[in-house]
């Protein structure tokens, strides 16, 4: 991991200035129907990251989903009309297209190489303030987090203590080389120093399909779980030191229909051993919607096998 002290401050500032030109402000208008069927326009805001000089912008699905109008403001103040190309609810990502070429695109990094303690910068436009993007610094606090938001479960997130404020959603989280390693997506209300971002490798997997087809689909099981480690096993007095401890099962999910309950410990999916939540997600994502899988769980002192049919995340 590179240490900030080993970098010349001017070099770091130059990197951030370059990245900032790839960050856009996104404004939206959504139509909400209130009582008496009255349609009321609601303004929203967020950030985005230019990922292709041809005008493709990566942002969050919750920022632009359902918007009647999308405005994209470049770093120099130029305002362009945006068109939603595609969205992915699983990763809370979306791609917006503007009719302008030769834009300054951000360089995408490799989020698989992220390490806890690594310094990162969150860039975005919190609160829709004038004057261009803002920059906050922090470190990677954890990886492979799963959280429950108002939009459902979001898996495999990066946790950071870099300040992520309203309006930062969709903006990039960059490393000391100025490469985008994640896309800011969520904060926990009333909690200081806890923000979450989508690993850029996850976003890469779905942006191509979104641009081609307008949607990205991925199989879903519908659980929140923790990787069972020796420390976790000792803390909760678990009989196993590997697998995935199920902490929550989504309503009307494949997991619920299969009979998986909180407290189950997932040991295998089909014939593949599951040692961590990353193993489980990898096994699921390598399958197709509609595939049937055999899940071996440890419950009340013995192993049980359950059958689940993977579905598309609602």
Image: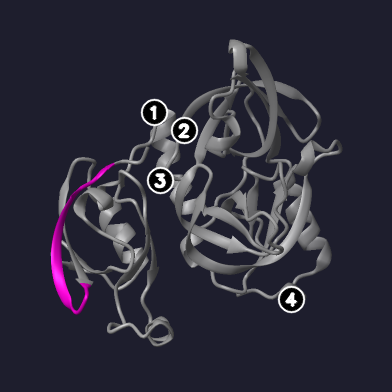
Is residue 186 one of those drawn in magenta?
no
Q: Are marks 4 and 2 in contact (CB under 8 Å)?
A: no
Q: Position of residue 306 (x, y in %)?
A: 15, 59
Residue 6 is labelled as 4
Disc 4 element: helix
Relative height, residue 89 to residue 197 (above, below): above
Residue 205 is labelled as 3
Residue 35 position by quadrant: top right
Camera-near label (4 vs 2) is: 2
Which residue is pictured at 68% across the width and 37% down the height?
A: 46
Name the residue that disc number 2 marks: 87
Q: How is the image coloured?
A: one colour
CA distance for labels 1 and 3:
12 Å
CA distance for labels 1 and 4:
42 Å
Camera-near label (1 vs 4) is: 1
Camera-near label (2 vs 3) is: 2
Dot 2 or dot 3: first in sequence order is 2
Q: Are marks 1 and 4 in contact (CB under 8 Å)?
A: no
CA distance for labels 2 and 3:
12 Å
Dot 1 or dot 4: first in sequence order is 4
């Amino acid at each position: 991991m590179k240490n900030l002290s080993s970098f010349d401050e001017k070099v770091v500032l130059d990197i951030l200035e370059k990245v900032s030109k790839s960050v856009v402000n996104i404004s939206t208008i959504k139509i909400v129907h209130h009582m008496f069927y009255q349609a009321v326009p609601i303004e929203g805001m967020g950030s985005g990251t230019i990922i292709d000089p041809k005008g493709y912008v990566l942002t969050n699905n919750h920022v632009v989903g359902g918007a009647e109008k999308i405005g994209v403001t470049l770093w120099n103040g130029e305002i362009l009309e945006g068109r939603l190309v595609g969205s992915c609810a699983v990763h809370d990502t979306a791609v917006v297209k503007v009719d302008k070429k030769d834009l300054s695109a951000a360089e995408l990094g490799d989020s698989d190489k992220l390490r806890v303690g690594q310094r990162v910068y969150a860039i975005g436009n919190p609160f829709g303030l004038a004057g261009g993007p803002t920059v906050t610094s922090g470190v990677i606090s954890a990886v492979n987090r799963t959280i429950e938001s108002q939009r459902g479960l979001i898996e495999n997130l990066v946790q950071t203590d870099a300040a992520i404020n309203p309006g930062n959603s969709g903006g990039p989280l960059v490393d000391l080389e100025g490469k985008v390693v994640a896309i800011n997506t969520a904060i926990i209300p009333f909690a200081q120093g806890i923000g979450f971002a989508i690993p850029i490798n996850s976003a890469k997997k779905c942006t191509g399909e979104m641009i081609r087809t307008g949607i990205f689909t991925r199989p879903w099981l519908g659980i929140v779980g923790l990787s069972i480690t020796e420390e976790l096993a000792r803390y909760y007095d678990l009989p196993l030191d590997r697998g995935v401890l199920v902490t929550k099962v989504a309503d009307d999910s494949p997991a619920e229909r299969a009979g998986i309950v909180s407290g189950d410990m997932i040991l295998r999916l089909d014939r593949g051993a599951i040692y961590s939540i990353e193993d489980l997600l990898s096994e699921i994502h390598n399958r197709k919607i509609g595939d049937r899988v055999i899940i071996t769980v440890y419950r009340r002192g013995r192993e049980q096998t359950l059958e689940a049919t993977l579905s598309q995340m609602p």
